[in-house]
Image (tube, helix red, strand yellow):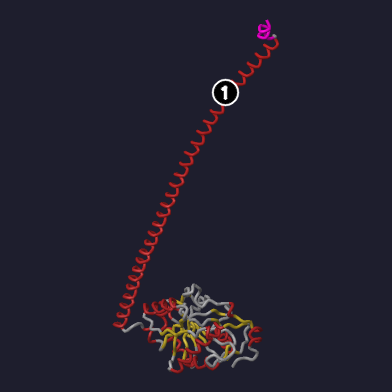
Amino acid sequence: MTQIQSRIKPPWVQSSFQGVVRKRSYLRSRVNVDLVVCGSLAAILFLMVVELLRLQGNTTRLSLQLKDMGMVESIVADSLSELQKQSREIQDELTGHGQSIQELKSRTSRQDKKRNRKRSGGPWYNSVFEKVYVVTFDECIQQEQRALDFSSDVGLDVDPFRAFPADDVKLGEPNLGMGIDLQADCISRHEVAAHLTHRQIWHEMLEDNYTKALIISDDLIVKESTLEILSEVMGDVEEQASTRDEDWHMVTFRRRKLDQNIHEEVFAGGPDGRFVTKASPSLGVSFYALSNKGAALLLSLVDSYRQPLDMQLAMLQESGKLKVLSACDNNRSVPDCPENAQFRRMKSQYGQDCRGFDRRDELSRKEYLSLYRNPVG
């Protein structure tokens, strides 16, 4: 009896037991579901890692490919650069050959012209002057060569005359016997060097006893039409000087009148209606003829630097001491007489204008006197 009672449990016990069983079954099923979900997530994560590794491998290969392409591009660029360099060298070589051929042709042409002039007795204007000076400068070798080539082409027999170097000018002591008595507002070594250059030419004229000479700066291209009338112009000047019993010192072919309104007296009738006049004070010493008496006069009067050379000569004109004639087209007076010559200054070997004025070389009168209190002479 007792055993039967022990087997029979109260209802509430059976109900609690069934609840526990159901809850355990629910929890077991829930755990199984969670395990399935976790397994799925793990599988997905694994696949993602695998895919990322694959993508990383592809990226690495792509990077290597791009690097290889960059190397290829660099090699191609270097090859192109080398080809361009070789192309430039070939082009320069061809240009050099072309210039050499052109120079050879030009030289041959000049030699032919020289031979032809020699057979025909040469141009008549070479008999007009005993000496033709072309003033040249150390820093302007190409400009000098151009002037000499032109002179050779037209048959003008010239002698290059090297200008006094501005760097050799000493402002504190006499230069070649010429002192400094500054009357201008400023002074520069270039201006003093111009005095010295022309004084050397004048001195050589007297020493070699030249009756008359022609002085030309190498930055001028003299027109052939002017060369062709030189003989007639100078012949008229000499004839009128003899008839009038007047000396002439200088004939300018390039000038700039200080006063355009001054009426000038006709000295001689030039060719083609171009009159030679008694020049009023003018600036310009780049293209002029000088007589022996003129050289002697200038050496005695221009014994010190007072003003720039052309200004100093203009003052001598104004005083009546220097007798200057103008062989420009005086019917139609134009500054610098372009009808006689063209101004063409080239670049120096340093890339600057030949004989370009350097303001750093200039001293004011006050600065000069503070450095060199007593006039040099």
Q: Judge whether residue 315 is colored magenta.
A: no
Apparent side of residue 52 relative to residue 232 in the rendered image (left or right): right
**Residue placed at 63% from the left, 88% from the top?**
372
Residue 144, above or below 28: below
Is residue 340 something one can see in this rendering? no
**Residue placed at 51% from the left, 75% from the top?**
332
User: Where is mark 1, residue-wise?
Assistant: 32
Q: Position of residue 135 (x, y in %)?
A: 46, 83
Q: Residue furthest top?
A: 1
Is residue 350 something one can see in this rendering? yes
What quarter of the picture does the N terminus occupy?
Answer: top right
**Residue placed at 59% from the left, 89% from the top?**
172
Closer to the camera in the image, 137 or 267? 137
Q: Position of residue 52 (x, y in %)?
A: 50, 38
Apparent side of residue 318 relative to residue 13 in the rendered image (left or right): left
Closer to the camera in the image, 246 or 358? 358
Majority secondary structure of the magenta segment? helix
Apparent side of residue 156 relative to residue 187 in the rendered image (left or right): left
User: Which quadrant of the figure has residue 123?
Assistant: bottom left
User: Which quadrant of the figure has residue 24?
Assistant: top right
**Kind of residue at badge 1:** Asn
Q: Position of residue 19 (x, y in %)?
A: 66, 15
Q: Judge whether residue 3 is colored magenta.
A: yes
**Residue placed at 55% from the left, 80% from the top?**
257
Q: Residue furthest left?
A: 119
Residue range of the region highlighted in magenta in the rendering: 1-9
